[in-house]
Image (cartoon, helix red, strand yellow):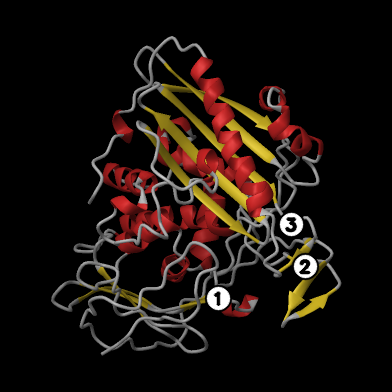
Amino acid sequence: MILRRTKGLPALFGLVFLGGILWPGPPCAGAPFSGLKNSRQLQGPSQKNKSDTLIYNILRQYPELFDSLLSARDELGIQVIYTQIDRSKKGKPVFREHRFNLDSSRYYYPASTVKLPVAILALQRLNELKIAGLDKNTTMITGSAGGRQTEVCNDPSSPDGRPSIAHYIKKILLVSDNDAFNRLYEFLGQEYINHTLQRMGYRNVQILHRLDISLPEEENRFTNPVTFMDTGGRVIYEKAAEKSQLDYASRNTKLGRGYLKDGQLVKEPFDFSKKNRLTLDELNSILKSVLFPESVPASMRFNLTPGDYAFLRRYMSMMPPESVSPVYDTTNYWDTYVKFLYYGAEKGTMQPGLRIFNKPGDAYGFMIDAAYIMDTVNQVEFMLSAVIYCNSDGIFNDDQYDYKKTGLPFMKNLGRVIDAYERTRVRKRPPDFAQFLFTYHD
């Protein structure tokens, strides 16, 4: 009997499943590292983006909620993108984007938001391979090639115990599962992820490491062997273990005034130079490309099928209690779980007619959310992406972040005041929600 990894609890959102059905798969055999590729320099950050006054003027109408934040917007690293959506005579979306304090050269740690492009790329990679019998529901066995790599031969959270790309993506979009992200990172490899996004035009992105597992840079270059099998145990596709030769643009990103290491305070800035990077404008564009692919340049669209788009949208908007596979405890995973924009830390039921398609993240005191908010009752739709820094003492790794005091109230209030503004905005034509309406409770 082979058990999946149970070590290392995710920092905030993830789950580790210790019970359930064990799929009786074959042993997870290791393989030597192979498949070295040519290195390629990745691009650095772009220049500062321009802002307009609309978002600022909306927020100034609520001084009790935003005045102190607006006066400290640079210190708090606040950045906001608000996208108005109108409809043409044929029902096609027409976008008007508004930006506040956006600065792509200013680093923030993207936390779990990097899971969105990796989940999308996992589906794209399957489409590129074009192998009969290989799809998102095919059994995916993760092996180990030594070091601190871990194996996965079963997934007790799935109905029959079989791990698969589809099930990993569900867990990422429903509760931001860290281990699920790591398995897709290992399937794709560091080079594929970064080179593909670079070629598509997402030139600031650097996805360089697994999450919730503290590994040095060199070990994150190594990714596990992965085998896909049919239900009869026949191998359909094998990806050998790899070592990335990625030559990414160097950064000198040091923040704060100290950090904890082995329980001791180190009185010097924390080094984020080798950490993941995903700017707010590119996160917003990636989300937009999934929701409205025709609205982005052809080069920036992912190679997805209509079924892939529907799959991503459905689980991005599904509430954890609606999920039958995986099943989530409603005490810990409520309707509005990780819907930072509009709900913040609020627990309870979702407002009738409201659906939020989003990918949030928070770590090291940074809080981010990118969302498409749809209200079928009030006939409102808009996109909203935001980041805020919640670490007033400047110390990292001490778990003394200002999420509850600053981050979550900001996200909740921001979502609600933009929604209130949207309800007053005159539209010539009503939204077309056809591609965003799903039957849940799978």
Image position of 407 with respect to 129: above or below: above
Q: Secondary structure at mark 3?
A: loop
Q: Outermost residue toward the left?
A: 232
From the viewer's perspective, tell me whether residue 341 is left or right of residue 304: right
Residue 436 is situated, as x and y percent measured from the top left of the image, at 33, 35
Q: CA distance from mark 3 to mark 1?
A: 22 Å
Which mark is drawn over residue 270? Answer: 2
Q: What residue does disc 1 label?
A: 213
Q: What residue does disc 3 label?
A: 391
From the viewer's perspective, tell me whether residue 226 is left or right of residue 307: right
Residue 311 is situated, as x and y percent measured from the top left of the image, at 30, 48
Q: Secondary structure at mark 1?
A: loop
Residue type at the position of mark 3:
Asn
Q: Mark 3 vs mark 1: which is more N-terminal?
A: 1
From the viewer's perspective, tell me whether residue 405 is left or right of residue 163: right
Image position of 256 with respect to 147: above or below: above
Q: Secondary structure at mark 2?
A: strand
Of residues 155 and 290, the one drawn nearer to the viewer in this rendering = 155
